[in-house]
Amino acid sequence: MGETEAMPETLIIIFAVVLVLVVGIGLYAGSRKKKSDTFRLDESITPVLTEEEAEALERAEAEVAAEEVPLGDEPVDPQTFTATLERPESVPSRMERLRARLARSGGMGKALLAILSRGDLTEDDWDEIEETLLVADVGLEASDELMENLRTQTKVRGTTDPAVVREILREQLLALVDPSLDRTLDTTPGIGEDGGQHPATVLVVGVNGTGKTTTIGKLARVLVAEDRTVLLGAADTFRAAAADQLATWGERVGVDVVRSDIEGADPASVAFEAVAEGRRRETDVVIVDTAGRLQNKGSLMDELGKIKRVMEKQAPVREVLLVIDATTGQNAMSQAKIFSEVVGITGIVLTKLDGTAKGGIVINVQRTLGVPVKFVGLGEGADDLAPFDPEGFVDALIS
């Protein structure tokens, strides 16, 4: 009886041991299988990559590094982030860079040197000289003066040495360009009757296609490079893109634009508000753009006079710059005369002077108006506007 009762307990123990062994073996096998599914790369082994894969890896690593923020750095607040503005090229630097471009307008000087160096000049040679001057838009009166002086000086010195002839030509051209003229731009803020500062105001005029709006943007860059504060007025309300164009120029150097949201708004009102805003901000210089208008449109020219008068209610207009396309030749002279009568031009900006043989227009326009060329545009780049340098101009002509 005792042996019979002990049998079930023994069987239970044996069954339990077997069950534990079976489960253990199963778990061990599962563990081995799981480990066999995991691949580990021996860190001592360097994988072989193709050239394209290696370049892609370098780019990815560089992008990750650029996005990483060092520990302790505060995140950038988007509201206080300010984009980096362009720093315009300094005036001395741009003058040096643009001398070579100015030399491209030296066709007149080179032609004159070639003729004067021939030796005993015949009347045909002198006729050729005169033709060269007229083609270069020097103008009839200035051409006659230059011809007479060249004849006299070459005869007095009795030489055909090219170096001497070049020096004579340089002296005569420089005298015609007149380096004694004041070519500075009056941008000194003034004091109003109320004792507050008012800006130096500049009115820019010219016909369609001369590059007037672009010139204003470039002029703003020149002034910013000289650490002046500038405000632009978009009084060309007839051309929808004009204000946008000015704003684009201003954004690049941190200059604001006063404009109207109404197409065809009163240009005089916009000009008035631009100067008034300049007074409120105590801005150094306010430059006002105007619609490019044909000189034979009397009503438009009268409107230009109105713009100037309205601006002067806020502050004196220090400068009235006429923008002229150097390639238009004698047509520019008639434009200049009309504008001068209406608004009293104080200075000339000659655009597109590079790549033209009509450099004589500098002499002609100055003699016609009695005012100096103050700036020249010598290319399409943002910093391709520079103060006019008489000696550099003449040297480039005959280099």
Image: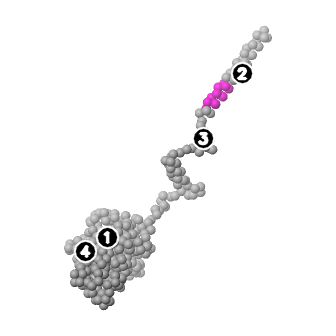
Residue drawn at x 69%, y 23% as measured from the top left: 21
**Amino acid on which the number 1 mark rests in the picture:** Gly
Q: Is residue 18 magenta?
A: no
Instruction: Identify the residue under disc 4.
Output: 329
- Determine contact: label 3, label 4, CB under 8 Å: no
In the rendered image, the quadrant that contains the N terminus is top right
In primary-sequence order, the first of circles 1 and 2 is 2
Tag 4's secondary structure? loop
The one of 122 and 14 positioned closer to us in this rendering: 122
- Determine contact: label 3, label 1, CB under 8 Å: no
**Amino acid on which the number 4 mark rests in the picture:** Gly
In the rendered image, the quadrant that contains the C terminus is bottom left
Range of magenta residues: 23-34
Tag 2's secondary structure? helix
Residue 265, horizontal then vertical, whole percent: 28, 66
In primary-sequence order, the first of circles 4 and 1 is 4
User: Residue 355 — which label?
Assistant: 1
- Determine contact: label 1, label 2, CB under 8 Å: no
The quadrant where residue 31 appears = top right
Residue drawn at x 58%, y 56% as measured from the top left: 70
Residue drawn at x 61%, y 39% as measured from the top left: 40
Please indicate, yes or no, whether residue 71 appears anywhere in the rendered image: yes
Instruction: Identify the residue under disc 3.
Output: 41
**Amino acid on which the number 2 mark rests in the picture:** Val
Compared across the picture, whether 87 is left or right of 10 comes to left
Compared across the picture, whether 40 is left or right of 336 comes to right
